Image (cartoon, rainbow, N blue to C red):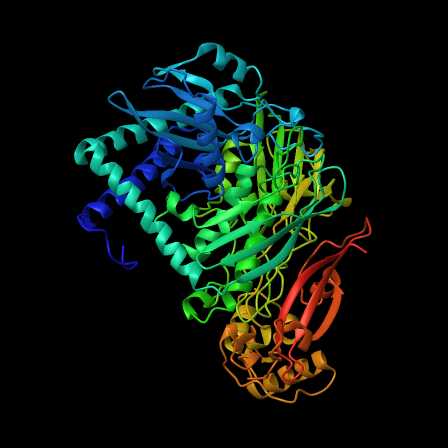
Amino acid sequence: MSTPHQLPEGYDPVTLEVIRMRLDSIVEEMGIAMIRSSGSPVITEAGDFNTALFDPTGRIYAYSDYVQFHIGSGSVAVQNLVKAIEGEPLAPGDAFICNDPHTAGASHPPDTNVISPIFHGDELIGWAQSQAHLVDVGGMTPGGFAPGARDCYAEALRLPPGVKVFERGEPVEWVRRILLNNVRVPALFWNDVRSLVASNNTGIRRLLGTVEEFGFDVFRDYTRLSFALAEQVVRERIARIPDGSYAAEEWTEHNGHDDELYRVACTMTKREDQITFDFSGSSEQTDGFVNCSYGALVGSVATAVVPILAWDVPFNEGVMTAFDIVAEPGSIVHPRPPAPISNGHLTTGARVSRVVTKLLNQACRGSSDEEIRERTQGVWGDSWTGGISAGTTDDGDYFVLFNMDGGGMGAGAQPERDGLDCAGMMTQVNNMLPDVEMNEMLYPVLYLWKQLNLDSAGHGAHRGGLGLRFAWTLHGADEVTQTVFAPSAQVVADGFGGGLPGGGSGHEVWRETDVARLLSAGRVPTRDSLGAEARELLAINQQSVTIRGEDVLVQWIAGGGGYGDPLLRDPQLVAADVRDQYVTEETALHTYGVVLTDGVVNEAATREARAAVRAERLGSAPERPVPNAVPAGASAPRRDEHGWYVPASGARLGNDADWHGAARKLTHVAAERLAEHGVRVRPRTTGGARVLIDEYYSPVCGTLLEAGIRVDQG
């Protein structure tokens, strides 16, 4: 291939595209089959699954757009299965089940894989793989999340690669009996296993039809070419990033037992068209449930790399070959047994995606290519703020509710617009939130409100997306046992280029409220009318919380980081935010420097207010003004042949390798500082570590260049 846009001689571009699109359509149809045959709202309402096709060695033919970090867990599961059953007989209709993070690469035990061989005649030509979050997989707590676990044996029934659950199209009865004897909702569990098998069967039929249509040799050659072309495009984009090493860190909060902070460190080395992500220096594995399996690590890296560098590239194995991952066994990002792992993907894994985003932000902003520079963004509020309720209804039926409203976190702001509200995690390409009516129909809960969390946005020239806030009370059950986790409570998502961090997550139980009296009187309960005896703030991770009929569970979810200095936001957008109740007039003035008179921008007063904010930042009037209506990204420092400069004003920041030393730096306690901007972050009250925010300002024009969360371990 002489250029990125030419095919090798003898290949037809139409055939190439038809086969590629056919594979994409097949994995999407597999997902439809799963949704239509499953009885679980985790699958049908929230789309917490993936479907994929692999070649015989475990390389990805095609992958569905649902949950991206399953890229890693699905790939590792297939590759480990191939090794585990080498030499064993296989037949059409066989299916293997696995969910063990340590031996099968699962993100966590509820994310269960079913993998089926694909035969063309007598030849194995690939694997169909379907993976979904099953509502319960045994273990010490309903729902498979176990904050109290000290080892992996307490978390779930662990299924390694090579467990055959269907043989020649029929269930393996003794395996089925063992599985159902170890889960709390056996009928729902087995139906979901069957839906995974049905998904695979759909993929097998459609793939064999494609092979018959084109011939196996043509199919094989064109899929190999698709691998090569995807890799080529990604490598070409990597080549447009400056060579160098970039370092960043994130922190996992609270391991289920201890309110400690666990380091997720990464050094990204970029040389020519290859990137290596080295996680050496991350914390050692812990005895809490926040360890991230290797499969989830791979998927969490891909979660950030794919939308930033391969946003329009058909996903297959070629995308994955352009970057390497290094992780020390025994660390929090590559644990060994018996490390517990049931929430590692949503805590430490999400931190991996955040740290990779920060690294690529550093690298991309130094590119001379505008397309690559525009891949920078505010960090997403990545964290699943979870709630799992288990109990018995008034009718005597046992239930487990894994509330998928926990996926309502805000996206990071983008170069051209605000971040999406309730977008989901960065890994959730097709994030869906359940309908209130669906949850109320299936489970004994009654929602009191479901709204945007106005305390969560990362302010900026473009505002980070808002998270979700909701509350429910029991309706049809006297009591439930609740498990909660809020992994982005204290160390929140950074903005970019002067954008401020977003807000955090959390849970409260409002005890002995007036909810029943209000409802019986025909009044809608509100936050101000519930009259709770006490508002109990729950730990970041907590299990075995009792919730009774008069109690109300309140949950709020993290927001995304902002993009660009808030003083660069169009005042008319700020006025619209106030009218739409996204921000208060106080925040409009204090954070954005916008003065409103009867809801209308007072332009002269706004210019004065913004000048006053810049003077307050520097302790004196700026030497150089910032023009009106500069782009959102104009506060992110750039480099030219003379060194670093501020695009918003042209102010210079020296010609050292790093611009930070030339900036004015202010440091505050993050929770206190962000509260001044109306953003809610949980203060740290235990341990020696402090969560701080470092703010860097241009000493010449007072532009906010960067505002980053930092952990000081004392």
Residue 556 in the image: state x and y as whole percent.
63, 50
Which residue occupies 26% across, 32% down?
A: 206
Q: Position of 479 compared to 464: left or right?
A: right
| Quadrant location of the N terminus in the rendered image | bottom left
Residue in the foreground of this view, choosing between 705 and 281? 281
Residue in the foreground of this view, choosing between 551 and 52? 52
| 380 shown above or below 577 | above
Residue 582: quadrant of the picture: bottom right
| 404 shown above or below 636 | above
Is residue 493 visible in the rendered image? The answer is: no
Residue 253 in the image: state x and y as whole percent.
70, 46
| Quadrant location of the C terminus in the rendered image | bottom right
| 81 shown above or below 330 | above
Is residue 511 visible in the rendered image? The answer is: yes
Residue 254 in the image: state x and y as whole percent.
72, 43
Q: Position of 419 compared to 5: left or right?
A: right
Marker count (numbered) = 0
Q: Position of 592 compared to 53: left or right?
A: right
| 5 shown above or below 521 | below
Residue 30 in the image: state x and y as whole percent.
34, 34
Residue 616: quadrant of the picture: bottom right
